[in-house]
Image (tube, rainbow, N blue to C red):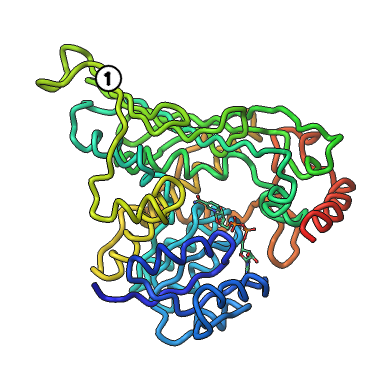
């Protein structure tokens, strides 16, 4: 198996992939982060030969770089992906490809021009229980999938103040202004990946429940705790997905319902529940099956040991490196990625505009690109300091208040000392 020379951009989350990359014959030749302490940690872990950069332009020009893993700020992936693709460097990008519609168009165009490929780093389809759900759906015994649910529900423990501050280290950080629907990929990607369905229309509603404003760490929390999205797909199936939610009871859960049977993982458990109409169950299979799945993978031990997110981190990186090696296009390509991002972005507009439905563009089509190529609306602060051009919450009073955010900055600095 040949070695792939890869660089990592953004080494907070990116820095958790070193073992996985090396296990899968990736050679980390360079890393880039503006945080010098994180660069020092990387040198300690990966050795003094590691090239470290604080500037993306220098990093991307590192000699021999074949591929990059983009794990920088959520709302800034697309421009860096475009730069890498323009240089013929393969891109694995963390889990939202673009944060504006115009960026989605630019990314697709850059990818089509490039000799390199683009893959979204969506790890949730590869989690242990999802690996099994995928196997079952692919087996075809459920019949035609007509309805599915995806929930990514990740409330944070308010007692873990330092960790919470590390997630939102300053008030202009993307997590402070993240509309719940924008982080849709963990809920939606598994359903698209298993079924091959592509979203065509979205309508969304918020779950509004303000955080206690007596606690300073909540000054940076928007009041929508979930966005519930209904998605109609090109194969007439319907998905209900959450975006990133924060209601009580942490879970990542998925349920797919077909004409003959349905499968789900039991909430906050690795167990699979597989049920059939009695008259449609495959020969010798019960109508009711509840079990713990196995990997059935030669790397099973390593997946459990070093692959975070129930093995998803290991498998998404292995797939990317294998695509580079085998000169193979990934399933979660630029069209898959931008369709998901469009669902998240347009679901938020549905929420802001009285829950009206939005058509999801197909960026393979010229007319859909033209419609959105100048749509730069964004709920996030720009990297150049430009102000957000969209609200981040369904109601104006649920937005973080500017005067409180100044206080939040002081608080976060104190916490992270
Ligand atoms: N798939 C998953 O399970 C999962 C889990 C956590 C985070 N993420 C994703 O990973 C990405 C990063 O999130 P995070 O948790 O690491 O937090 P983060 O966004 O705060 O960290 C980003 C890192 O990139 C660096 N960085 C950002 N812009 C830079 C620039 N222009 N030049 C140099 N360095 C720069 C920062 O210093 C920081 O170390 C996000 O897109 C997030 O959605 C995914």
| Front residue of this view, candidates 42 and 199 | 42
Q: Residue furthest top?
A: 279
Name the residue located 39 percent from the left edge and 49 percent from the top edge.
311
Q: In terms of secondary structure, where does tag 1 sit?
A: strand
Q: Is residue 141 left or right of residue 253?
A: left
Where residue 78 sits: x, y (%)?
A: 53, 62
Residue 395 horizontal/vertical position (percent) = 74, 33
Residue at 38% in and 77% down: 5
Residue at 69 percent across and 28 percent down: it is 208
Question: Which residue has dot 1 on it?
Answer: 275
Q: Which image quarter has ligand 1?
A: bottom right
Near-viewer residue (249 or 369): 249
Res 225 → quadrant = top right
The quarter of the picture where the N terminus appears is: bottom left
- Compared to 35, does 137 lie above or below? above
Tell me, yes or no, if residue 252 can be seen here: yes
Number of numbered discs overlaid on the protein picture: 1
State whether residue 367 appears in this view.
Answer: no
Q: Percent from the top left, x then y, of residue 29?
A: 45, 79
């Amino acid at each position: 198996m040949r070695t792939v020379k890869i660089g990592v951009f953004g080494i907070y989350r990116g820095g958790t992939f070193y073992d996985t990359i090396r296990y899968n014959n990736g050679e980390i030749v360079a890393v880039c982060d503006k945080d010098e302490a994180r660069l020092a940690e990387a040198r300690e872990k990966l050795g003094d030969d590691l090239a470290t950069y604080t500037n993306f332009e220098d990093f991307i020009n590192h000699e021999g770089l074949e591929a990059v893993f983009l794990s920088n700020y959520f709302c800034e992936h697309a421009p860096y992906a475009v730069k890498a693709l323009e240089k013929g460097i393969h891109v694995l990008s963390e889990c939202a490809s673009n944060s504006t519609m115009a960026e989605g168009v630019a990314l697709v165009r850059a990818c089509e021009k490039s000799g390199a490929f683009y893959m979204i780093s969506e790890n949730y389809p590869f989690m242990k229980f999802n690996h099994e759900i995928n196997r079952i759906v692919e087996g075809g015994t459920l019949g035609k999938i007509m309805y599915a649910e995806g929930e990514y529900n990740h409330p944070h423990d308010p007692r873990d103040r330092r960790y919470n501050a590390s997630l939102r280290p300053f008030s202009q950080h993307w997590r402070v202004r993240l509309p719940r629907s924008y982080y849709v990929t963990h809920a939606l990607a598994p359903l698209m990946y298993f079924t091959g369905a592509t979203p065509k229309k979205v309508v969304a509603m918020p779950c509004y429940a303000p955080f206690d404003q007596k606690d300073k760490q909540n000054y940076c929390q928007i009041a929508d705790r979930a966005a519930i999205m209904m998605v109609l797909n090109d194969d007439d199936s319907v998905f209900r997905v959450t975006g990133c939610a924060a209601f009580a009871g942490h879970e990542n859960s998925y349920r797919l319902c077909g004409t003959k049977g349905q499968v789900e993982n039991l909430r906050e458990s690795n167990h699979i529940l597989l049920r059939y109409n009695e008259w449609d169950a495959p020969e010798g299979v019960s109508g009711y099956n509840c079990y713990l799945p196995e990997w059935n993978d030669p790397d099973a031990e390593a997946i459990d040991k070093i692959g975070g997110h129930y093995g998803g981190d290991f498998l998404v990186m292995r797939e990317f490196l294998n695509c580079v090696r085998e000169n193979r296009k990934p399933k979660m390509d630029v069209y898959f990625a931008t369709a998901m991002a469009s669902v998240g972005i347009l679901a938020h507009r549905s929420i802001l505009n009285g829950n009206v439905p939005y058509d999801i563009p197909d960026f393979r089509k010229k007319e859909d690109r033209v419609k959105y190529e100048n749509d730069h609306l964004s709920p996030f602060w720009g990297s150049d300091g430009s102000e957000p051009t969209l609200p981040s919450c369904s109601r104006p009073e649920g937005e973080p208040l500017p005067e409180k955010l100044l206080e939040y900055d002081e608080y976060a600095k104190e916490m992270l000392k």
